[in-house]
Image (cartoon, helix red, strand yellow):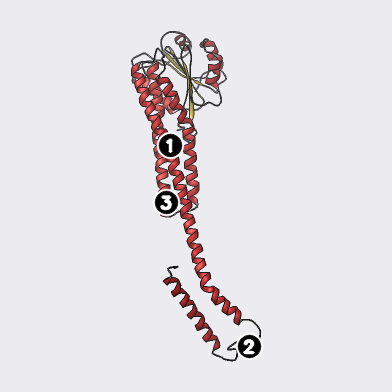
């Protein structure tokens, strides 16, 4: 739970993978010191803005507004002291939709890391656990490379599941297309579009960060960021493939349903063609006027029935000969 200033978690980063939890005045003292500290805030808490304005006085109001904004999109803005970064991760919270991606807003420089969230993000929890175990980031560059790696690694199972669901729908459409499959395809395409909307801008963020000249970002972490960039590019390509496959499956579904309808219409047309002359004859002989042949013959009805069956048989034989049926 956040304290009166909206602080969810605060710790020092000791340079050896460990982090010591900070409370009370230690947070303010270390955040002003040259030693590296990480403070994680709840953007929805009313005390968060006051704490940022009081403790980190050099932050531009634009940065504070971006950190606490209601709605954000992934981006990166360079400043003289550090960088403002906004990233998103899949929503793995209970009863949530993964495509409703959760934002993490960061101010990061060589001596302090300020992260702000509105909803819980498991990638942040991963970093806290690593710091407690002694395998966490050693500096600001490690922090951002580890965080982006965990954000993107958490995406992979979700995107794999999306691809497998599309495989199942595609198999159903190929075997027995039904109108219900259309809703499933539309749902998959919508998810892929929403994922891409937030993942694609992060490619630009990582690419921009990788070529930046920030003094605290060393060559090793730039190589790690390159790996993260390759990962996110692959995800974007996978999402594009899923969207294209979903459209192809939807077209195949439309073709399958159209073929089924055409087949039904064809059967009805053949039946109508068979009964058309039979209906003409029965209608002609059913008129109530004099001179109808066989009206005085008791066997005329059965002769007429046999004639109708004979005509029907000839039609069926002719249709088969012409390969209409």
Residue wearing tag 1: 239
Q: Is residue 311 left or right of residue 223?
A: right
Q: Image quarter for residue 140?
A: top left
Is residue 96 among the parts visible in the rendering? Answer: no
**Res 222 quadrant in image:** top left
Judge depth for marks 2 and 3 and give the one in front.
2
Q: How many marks?
A: 3
**x, y (%) of residue 284?**
60, 80
- Residue 273 locus on image (x, y percent): 52, 71
Where is the C terminus found, in terms of image quarters? bottom left
Residue drawn at x 40%, y 36% is: 238
Q: Residues within 10 Å of mark 3 (few under 14, many from 20)?
A: some
Q: Given contact means CB atoms under 8 Å apart, are the residues at marks 3 and 1 in contact?
A: no
Measuring from the top left, give residue 218's x and y in whole percent. Answer: 36, 15
Report whether 85 appears left or right of 150: right
For label 3, the residue is 172
Disc nearer the start of the sequence (2/3)? 3
Give the structural element (helix, strand or loop) at label 1.
helix
x and y percentages locating residue 130 in the rendered image: 36, 22
Mark pair 1, 2: CA separation:
78 Å
8, above or below 59, in the image: below
Do the CB atoms of the residues marked 2 and 3 lie less than 8 Å apart? no
């Amino acid at each position: 739970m956040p304290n009166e200033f909206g602080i969810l978690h605060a710790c020092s980063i000791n340079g050896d993978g460990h982090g010591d939890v900070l409370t009370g005045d230690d947070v303010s003292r270390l955040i002003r010191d040259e030693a590296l500290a990480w403070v994680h805030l709840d953007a929805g808490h009313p005390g968060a803005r006051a704490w940022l304005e009081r403790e980190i006085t050099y932050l531009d109001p634009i940065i504070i507004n971006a950190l606490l904004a209601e709605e954000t999109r992934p981006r990166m803005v360079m400043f003289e002291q550090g960088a403002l970064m906004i990233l998103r991760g899949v929503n793995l919270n209970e009863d949530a939709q993964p495509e409703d991606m959760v934002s993490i807003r960061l101010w990061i420089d060589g001596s302090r890391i300020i992260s702000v969230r509105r909803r819980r993000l498991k990638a942040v929890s991963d970093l806290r656990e690593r710091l407690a175990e002694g395998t966490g980031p050693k500096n600001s560059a490690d922090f951002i490379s580890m965080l982006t790696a965990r954000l993107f690694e958490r995406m992979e199972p979700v995107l794999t599941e999306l691809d497998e669901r599309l495989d199942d729908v595609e198999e159903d459409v190929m075997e027995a297309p039904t109108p219900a499959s259309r809703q499933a395809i539309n749902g998959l395409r919508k998810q892929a579009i929403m994922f891409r909307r937030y993942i694609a801008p992060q490619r630009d963020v990582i690419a921009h960060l990788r070529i930046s000249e920030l003094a605290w970002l060393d060559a090793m972490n730039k190589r790690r960021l390159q790996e993260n960039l390759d990962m996110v590019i692959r995800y974007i390509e996978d999402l594009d493939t899923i969207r294209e496959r979903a459209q192809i499956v939807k077209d195949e579904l439309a073709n399958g349903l159209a073929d089924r309808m055409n087949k039904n219409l064809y059967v009805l047309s053949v039946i109508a063609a068979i009964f058309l002359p039979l209906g003409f004859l029965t209608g002609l002989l059913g008129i109530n006027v004099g001179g109808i042949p066989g009206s005085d013959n008791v066997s005329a009805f059965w002769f007429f029935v046999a004639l109708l069956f004979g005509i029907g048989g000839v039609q069926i034989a002719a249709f088969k000969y012409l390969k209409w049926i």
